[in-house]
Structure formats: structure tokens, C-alpha cells
Image: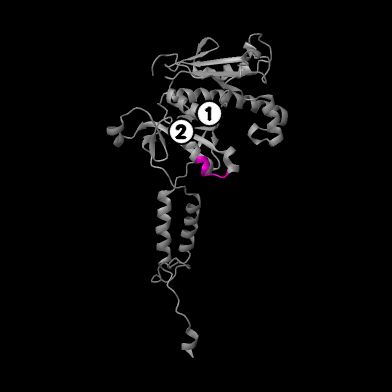
Amino acid sequence: MSKFRKDGKKGMPAISTASLPDIVFMLLFFFMVTTVMRETTLFVSVTTPKATEIKKLKKKSLVSYIYIGSPVRRMQSSYGTAARIQLNDAFASVDEIQEFIATEREARDEKEIPYMTTSIKADETVKMGIITDVKQELRKANALKINYSTRKGTY
Amino acid sequence: MASSRRGLPEINAGSMADIAFLLLIFFLVTTTMDQDTGIARKLPPMPEEELEEDDSQINAKNIYTVLINSNNQLLVEGELMDISQLKDGAKKFINNNGIDPNSSENPEKAIISLQNDRGTEYMTYIRVQNELAAAYTDLRNNASLNEFGERYADLNKSQTKEIRKMYPQKISEAEPKNIGGDE
């Protein structure tokens, strides 16, 4: 019989769960603050190429996205597998890019226009032809700040 | 006596955790932690109609031409090169400082001219862009370690400006051509 042995019947005391809501709320706020909702449904499958010299894209509200890739499987029956451009929620042709940039600009404050960036999210297998066309249109629209979206990594 | 002290009955906060959990799980599922990253570039403005090309002012030896064909092969300064060697090649060219008479005079004058085919794969293009950017990053890092004893990324604004002046990143992209036939 050891000195410290307590009465065997007592068992473990119940852990107080009173602070559980606080902990959960703390986590909740963390995720609420960090969350970014996806605003567009992707119709094209995009696996961005890997690169090492990457920069973070700041000020997400000033970024317009251009997706380029082959249509996702469920769209392939109607759109084929050739690489296509997606702007907002629909497939687009190259000519529509200037219009797209114009509407993106209208939605922003005039002062912010010079800081607007166009992020090109293209699949690594697309050919440069379509990218070049997009770049030419961006030049015509005078949207010169671009960002080639890439993942971190090396080949 | 007891009844007057009682006041409002206490709200049972036991289900608070459940509600919070529900919300938490919702945000956990919808959250995407990945931040968008990429290679930032600036496109040249559209050329004015009557503006003449002033390429003649640039000495040919200050231009490092990189051509990519539709088979994703590199032709650098007229010679076939593997992508893995491009970084060192570009560094050597930029940092030549007139040692080799056929290479650049100094880093400020050095220009990298990049031209790709319409049939080039995007992946290769990005790799080339990445290697060229890496060459500049290396050179800038070396310069800032020598000058200020810190890495380029840790410098303050005026120091960054100074290093950028030493090694301006001049990557020019020629107007696209269709060298390799159809896509």
C-alpha cells in the first residue's frame, strides 16, 4: 500500500469542457480570416508549370485572371480538347480579352488601374501560340503588368 | 427572498460549441491556403506606328539571343544549348564586363533577347524565363553580398535600387514569329 494511493473508487475527475467553445471559436476566426472563396468555376484544366523565381501575387482585388488550358472532361464532348481561354465564367475567344480588361478596369477605382495585374494561369502543355495571342491582346489593351502563374518547384 | 434574487434564467451555452464546430468545419472545407505565385513580367507597350526601330543603336555584342523552336530546343547565340546550362551562360554573358570582346560590355548594357515559336510548349517557355530570372537573382545576390553583406531580398529600398541599377533585368521579347511551321 503506497502512501499516495487514493481511494480506488474516486476514478478520474471529469475534464472541464467549459473552454472548448473558446478554443473552437479561435480556430473558427482564424479560418474565417484566411479563407478565400473560389469565385470562378474552372472549365479548363490547368496545371501551372513549376518555377523557382516566383513572387507572391499581392492585392488579390486588383488581379484579373485569364485561364488557358484544354476543357475539362465533361466539357470535352461539346468543346473538344484544343486549348481554350476562359474569362470569368465562360469560354472566350482572343478578341474578347480587350473587352474583358475594359470591364475589369471599370469595376476598379481609377487610382488603382495602374496597379492592376493580369495573371495568366495556363496549363504547362499549351503551346505558346495562344499565349502569344493573349499577350498581344493585353498589349493592345495596355494591360502591361502580367504574372505567369507558376507553382514552386523544379523539374 | 430567493425568488427576487433569481432574475433572468441562465442561457444554456452547451450547444455553443456545436454551432462553432459547424461553422469551423464549413470554413475548413472551403478554405484554400495556397497563395497565388508566379513570375511577374512587364509587357512592352504597343509600338507607335511611325516609330522606327532603334535596334541599330544597340551593339550586337550586347545582345544575348535565346531562340526556342517548336521542338522546345534552345538556340543560344547561334548554338544549341540545354536548358540546364542557360543560367550559367546568361550569367557569364551579363557579367562579362568586356573581358570577352564578343560578349557584353557591362551588365547595364546587356540585353537578353528571347524569341519563341508559336509551337513552343508553355512549360519550356516558363523554364527559360525562370532560368534567366535565376541568373539575374544570382548576380544581384552576389553583388548585394559584396556591397552590403546581405542577401538581395533583405535589402532596404534604396539599396535594392542601387543593385537594380547595377544589374537591370533587361529581357526583351521579340515579336512572335512562326518559325517551326504549324502548331
Amino acid type of disc 2? Ile
Q: Position of residue B26 (x, y in %)?
A: 40, 54
Which is nearer the eye, B63 or A28?
Answer: B63
Residue appearing at x 65%, y 32% in the figure? B152
Q: Is residue A4 left or right of residue B64?
A: left
| Res. A60 visible in picture | no
Q: What colour scheme has been applied to the protein in the rendered image? A: one colour
Q: Are marks 2 and 1 in contact (CB under 8 Å)?
A: no
The quarter of the picture where the C terminus of chain B appears is: top left
Q: What chain does badge 1 belong to?
A: A
Residue B96 tag number:
none
Number of other residues with Cα within 10 Å of mark 2, as a class: few under 14, some 14 to 19, many 20 or more: many
Q: Is residue B130 left or right of residue B142?
A: left
> Label 1, on which residue?
A139
Is residue A6 shown above or below B28? below
Q: Residue furthest left?
A: A77
Magenta highlight on residue B133? no
Q: Position of residue A41 (x, y in %)?
A: 38, 42
Q: Quadrant of residue B121?
A: top left
Magenta-drawn segment = A104-109
Residue appearing at x 43%, y 45% in the figure? A39
